[in-house]
Structure formats: C-alpha cells, structure tokens
C-alpha cells in the first residue's frame, strides 16, 4: 500500500505500489531486512533510476576499505550538519549496533572523536562539508599522518556524497521516523 503520512511530502512505496522498475530492488531490500524496508527506500522507489543509483553506490561502498564505525561516524556528521533527524536516527541505531559507544556517537554528530585517527579524518570531512568542498591541504596531510591512505580518504569523500544524498532526499520528503523498523537498505550506508 502506498503511504503518504501527514508529514511525508512523497508517497512511501512498498513492493505492491512501487513503480515496476523499482519492485525488484524493493523485494531484495525486504528479503534482507526481514520483510520491511525503510521509509527512505520507500520514497526513493518513486524514481527507479535514483533508487538504482543509490543502491549501487551504497553496495560498492559497503565493500570498500573503511571500517563500518568510520562510515557511520561520517554519516552521523553529515546527517547532523544537514539537519536530517530521520538519517541521524537511522545511523545512530546502526552505529550502536557496531558497538560504537554513546559518547562516540554524540561526538561524531559534531565531526568529533576521542580517537585521534578518526578525529583527523572527521576534521578533513568537516572542512569538505562546511566549505566549498575544498578542504585545506594540511587537513589531508594530517589525516595521512594519522594513518589514513589516499584510498581511504577518497572513499570517505564518496561516503560524504552518499550521506548528503540520503539527507537531501530525507529532508525533501520530511520523512517521519522509522523508529522500530529493522536496519535495511537505507540505514547501514
């Protein structure tokens, strides 16, 4: 059934209401999430090409070199910066499931970490997000000195783009909370 809540600006599809070209992706997401998909995926299903692009990028990045806790720190920082409560909630749940402590989750929302290596990366990401996309060279050098490779830095930039996309869609749709929904295609970015 198509759902349009009082606060969602777009229809939230499931496998029965999604456009034909989105249905296979919705069914895969349901199978991986115990029969349910996130509201984000339900909204994105309206545009099969956008849903395919998101899922392909997300799939490729999940098999990258960055640890999941690092990916979640990036997603939390970007979501908070974008003022996206839906994605913040999703990424907090996933981060906690990776044993990232409450203090680190809260710190990540402000581009901070008590881990010096993570902090160096988050400082680079913060400058990327809060400026014109051209962080000062010394921030990249500090991240390298902390132990991040160029491959990891570039992958982190890709995670920023993925998180920005999710936040833009979530905010445009004014998505309501998934609360008890299972972690699904949109949550563990």
Image (cartoon, grey):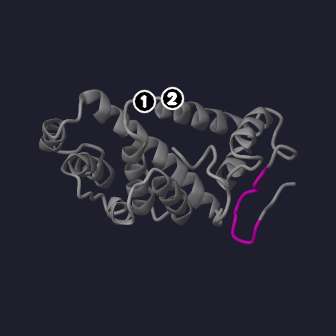
Per the model, the C-alpha gap separating discs 1 and 2 is 7 Å
Q: Nearer the viewer, residue 86 or 30?
A: 30
Q: Is residue 6 magenta?
A: yes
User: Mark 1 touching mark 2, by CB under 8 A?
Assistant: yes
Q: Is residue 65 left or right of residue 62?
A: left
Q: Report the span colored magenta.
A: 5-13
96 or 63, which lies in front?
Answer: 96
Disc number placed over residue 118 in the picture, else none: none
Number of numbered discs overlaid on the protein picture: 2
Q: Nearer the viewer, residue 69 or 86?
A: 69
Q: Residue at x 52, y 66 (%)?
A: 85
Q: Secondary structure at mark 2?
A: helix
Where residue 168 appears, as percent x and y from the top left, is 53, 53
Q: Nearer the viewer, residue 105 or 8?
A: 105
- Residue 55 in the image: x percent, y percent? 60, 35
Residue that numbered label 2 is attached to: 60
Q: Secondary structure at mark 1?
A: loop
Instruction: Name the residue: 53% across, 63% down.
Output: 89
**Residue drawn at x 78%, y 38% as measured from the top left:** 27
Mark drawn on residue 64? 1
Q: Is residue 74 magenta?
A: no
């Amino acid at each position: 059934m198509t759902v349009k809540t009082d606060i969602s600006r777009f229809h939230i599809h499931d496998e029965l209401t999604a456009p034909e070209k989105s249905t296979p992706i919705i069914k895969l997401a349901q199978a991986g999430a115990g029969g349910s998909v996130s509201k984000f995926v339900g909204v994105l299903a309206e545009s099969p090409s956008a849903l395919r692009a998101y899922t392909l990028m997300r799939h490729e990045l999940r098999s990258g070199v960055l640890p999941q806790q690092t990916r979640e720190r990036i997603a939390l920082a970007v979501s908070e910066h974008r003022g996206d409560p839906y994605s913040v909630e999703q990424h907090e749940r996933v981060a906690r499931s990776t044993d990232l402590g409450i203090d680190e989750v809260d710190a990540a929302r402000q581009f901070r970490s008590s881990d010096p290596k993570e902090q160096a990366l988050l400082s680079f990401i913060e400058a990327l997000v809060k400026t014109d996309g051209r962080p000062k060279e010394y921030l990249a050098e500090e991240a390298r000195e902390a132990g991040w490779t160029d491959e990891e830095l570039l992958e982190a930039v890709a995670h920023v783009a993925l998180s920005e996309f999710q936040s833009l869609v979530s905010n445009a749709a004014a998505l309501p909370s998934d609360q008890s929904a299972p972690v699904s295609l949109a949550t563990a970015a």
